[in-house]
Image (cartoon, rainbow, N blue to C red):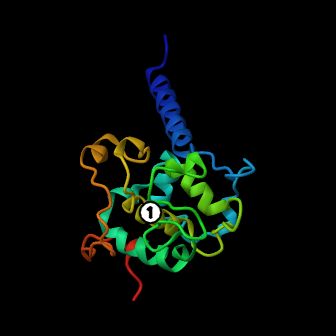
Amino acid sequence: MINRKLLMAGFAAAALALGAAGAMAQIELHNTVTGEPLNLSDAGEEGQDTPAFKEFLQTGKNPYNKEPNCLANGEQLFLSMCSGCHGHVAEGKIGPGLNDNYWTYPDNNTDKGLFETIFGGASGQMGPMYGAVNPDQMLQIMSWVRHLYKDGVEDAAWLDDDQKASFKPYDGHAHAPKPDPEKTPETCKVSE
């Protein structure tokens, strides 16, 4: 006869091990051009311990895409770090446009792909950005870029079904909506 306590303890240990293994699962990030694995430690620790970045590493989806209170900080970061090459509304200048359905690197149509390009760089003048902005800030910049998208919803792979149902292309307003200070995550507070 099987000892019931031992059996239950075995099930509990197995469930705990499976839960821990599931919690450890992460997406694999690779350099956009070479395909080599990206080393997140190149960026240092700042911005890797946020709930949003941890969720991104588990799902490959940017949680800031659903957080309008983070758009203002994403805009500020984009304007200071990206607009010189990609234009003020991501229309393209020296670098390609980011607000339409054409992607120089097709994987940039996903949050994972766009993060890989920002973090590790690409061809031409697009160097790795991990020394200039931290990984959480990269996600905020990405959410601003997604906000600027002006083409069809059918080409927006980063949107889930609910977002696609309520999608409205970028309307040309120059600035992000004003964030609600009480609902804005700490990581998205705009620097004064």
- Residue located at (41% from left, 65% from top): 144
- State whether residue 80 is above or below residue 106: below
The percent coordinates of residue 160 (x first, y second) are: 35, 43
- State whether residue 148 is above or below residue 163: below
Q: In the shown orientation, is residue 91 left or right of residue 70? A: right
Residue found at the far front of this picture: 93
- State whether residue 103 is above or below residue 128: above
Q: Which quadrant of the rendered structure holds the C terminus?
A: bottom left
The residue indicated by pointer 1 is 145
Instruction: Determine which quarter of the picture holds residue 128.
Output: bottom right
Helix, strand or loop under label 1: helix
Q: In the shown orientation, is residue 133 left or right of residue 151? A: right
Work out whether residue 154 or residue 166 is closer to the camera in this orientation and state it: 154
> Label 1 amino acid?
Val
Q: In the shown orientation, is residue 122 left or right of residue 4? A: right
The percent coordinates of residue 12 (x first, y second) are: 47, 32
